[in-house]
Structure formats: C-alpha cells, structure tokens
Image: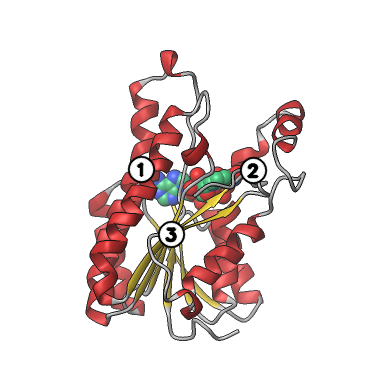
Amino acid sequence: MTLLNDKIVLVTGGSRGIGQNVCVRLAGMGATVGINYVSNSTAAEETLSCIQENGGKGFLSCFDVSDSSAVQEAVKDITSTHGSVDVLVNNAGITRDGLMARMKDSDWDSVLNTNLKGAFTCSKAVMKGMMKNRWGRIINITSVIGFLGNAGQVNYAAAKAGLVGLTKSMARELAGRSITVNCVAPGYIITDMTSELSEEIQDAIKAQIPLGTLGQPEDVAAAVAFLASPDSGYMTGQTLHVNGGMYMGN
Ligand SMILES: NC(=O)c1ccc[n+]([C@@H]2O[C@H](COP(=O)([O-])OP(=O)(O)OC[C@H]3O[C@@H](n4cnc5c(N)ncnc54)[C@H](OP(=O)(O)O)[C@@H]3O)[C@@H](O)[C@H]2O)c1
C-alpha cells in the first residue's frame, strides 16, 4: 500500500503494544516512521527491525513526551534529518491505578503529564510544520475508560477524557489548514498494559464485551491507519471506538 508514500510519521510510545503495531502498519503504507520511546530501547529496536524486515523505513527517537523542551528538541532533529512530521500519533500512555482516597499526587501528575500533557506538547511541536504544508493528521489514542469512567482509575479516566476535549478544540483550530485531529478509543487490548490483569478480572471484562474477547493491537492500528490516510480527509474532531461493542455511545 502506498497511501502514505513520502509522509513522515511520528508515533509516540512506538516501542511496544499498540504503538508498535501502529508503526509497522503505517510503514507498510509507505511512510517513514519515527518510533518514539522513553526507556525500552530493545523494544524500540525490535519495532524498527520489524519495519525494515517488511521493506519499510523508520528511525528511533527517544524522548519523554511530558518534557516539553525534550519534545521540541527531538522534533527539531527529526525535521532537519527527515523532513517535517505529516502524521502524529499521540499513543504514549501509562497507568498508575489506585482508589482516589489513597491516590498519591505523584500518581495523578505522572498520568496526566504523560497521557494528556504529552499529546499537547507533541502536537504543539509538530503543528507549525503541518500548518506550513497545509496538510496534517493528528491521532490521539484515548480509551473506553475516558467515556465510561472506572473505579481505581480517576487519573487515567480524566487524562483520556481530557484528550477528547483537546482533540475537538484542536480540530476546530486547525481545520482551516487541512489538518485533521481525531481520536481512537480502544477498549481492552492485549498488551503489557493489560497483561497484569488476573484471569478473574479478564473474565469479568469479557462478560461486558458483546464480541466476547479482548482486542488485539492490530485492531487499533487498523483504525489509526484509516485516520492517517487520505480516505479520512472529511473527518475531524471524531472518535473511532475499537472496543468489541463494550461502549456504543459517542
Ligand atoms: N492496552 C489497552 O487495553 C488500552 C486500552 C485503551 C487505551 N490504551 C492506550 O493506548 C496507548 C498504548 O497502550 P499500550 O497498551 O500499547 O501500552 P504499553 O504496551 O504499556 O506501551 C506503552 C508505550 O508508551 C511509551 N511511553 C510511556 N511513557 C512514555 C513517555 N513519558 N514518553 C514517551 N513514551 C512513553 C512506552 O515506552 P517504553 O517502551 O520506552 O517504556 C511504550 O512504548 C496508551 O495511551 C494507552 O493508554 C490502551
């Protein structure tokens, strides 16, 4: 597929899970993919090898999405080496779960900083180039939890719901330059993030999913691929839900 030929893509948190799959999928569409990660260089190199084994192009970019000067420095570097970023996927995310009564401020801050501020800093760093080119795609990975809420995840739910508001506002600000901004909201997907859930909890989750199984990273990557492609050019400010039917609202 050549829908993204000559495009530069940056995927935050591209070393593992959903982000890794997104990197491979978009590289398969012809893009040169920047694989961001914060600490796991072995996993990031695996993503790059996977892209290259399939005949695609990519590069590594290590930075913390919540550190705005590191983000600006990295994007400057990418732009001078590869060209300006055409497609940004804000995927980097963490959880620090616990009931609110016992939640430490540091757990609130780190989840908000990575999941929400990270999308703000990365989008801000790439949008100038997109505005100049009068084309761009920004895709924010939110979560079904941002729509349903979840006991034990007030920080994560707030960050993910915040991403939806960020997306809609950015979509309005950038539409005049043909830059679209959309969300993908996964349900429960099998990755490192969910691997710690006990079998009992996984069974309870499955009982709430009409399609009866947890999702695969590929299911999410397919939705991202559509939003990154020219085919989605008339969609902005939207959320695509990829959750097996667990949540059917908007
Ligand atoms: N899995 C699910 O069921 C599910 C459901 C809904 C939404 N989501 C969302 O989908 C996204 C990906 O989730 P996942 O399950 O694939 O997660 P994952 O397997 O835990 O991978 C997280 C990725 O984020 C990177 N990362 C974490 N903090 C970062 C930071 N400060 N700066 C840069 N990169 C950072 C990690 O890099 P390192 O490898 O260097 O640590 C890793 O690549 C997240 O936003 C998550 O909230 C996941």
Q: Is residue 243 above or below residue 96?
A: below
Residue 38 makes an appearance in the image: no
Query: Is 79 left, or right, of 99 in this rendering?
Result: left
- For the question of whether residue 225 can be seen, the reply is yes
Mark 3 residue element: loop
Mark 2 or mark 1: name the one nearer the start of the chain. 1
Contact (Cβ within 8 Å) of mark 2 with mark 3: no
CB of mark 3 near ligand 1 (< 8 Å): no
Residue plotted at (61% across, 69% down) = 49
Mark 2 secondary-structure assignment:
loop
Nearer to me, 137 or 124 = 137
Give the residue drawn at x 28%, y 59%: 170
Q: Which residue is labeled 2 in the image?
A: 246
Q: Label 1 sits on what residue type? A: Gly
Residue under the image location 22 percent in, 70 percent down: 128
Q: CA distance from mark 2 to mark 1?
A: 20 Å
Mark 2 burial class by Cα count in 10 Å: few <14, some 14-19, many 20+: many
Q: Which residue is mark 1?
A: 162
Instruction: Return the mark for residue 238.
Output: 3
Label 3 neighbour load within 10 Å: few <14, some 14-19, many 20+: some
How far is disc 2 from disc 3 in space, using C-alphas?
A: 18 Å
Q: Residue furthest front?
A: 249
Q: CA distance from mark 3 to mark 1?
A: 14 Å
Residue 201: percent from the left, percent from the top?
Answer: 70, 28
Is residue 202 depicted above or below 128 in this figure?
A: above
Secondary structure under badge 1? helix
User: Is 38 left, or right, of 226 in this rendering?
Assistant: left
- In front of the other: label 2 or label 1? 2
The amino acid at mark 2 is Met
Q: Are marks 2 and 1 in contact (CB under 8 Å)?
A: no
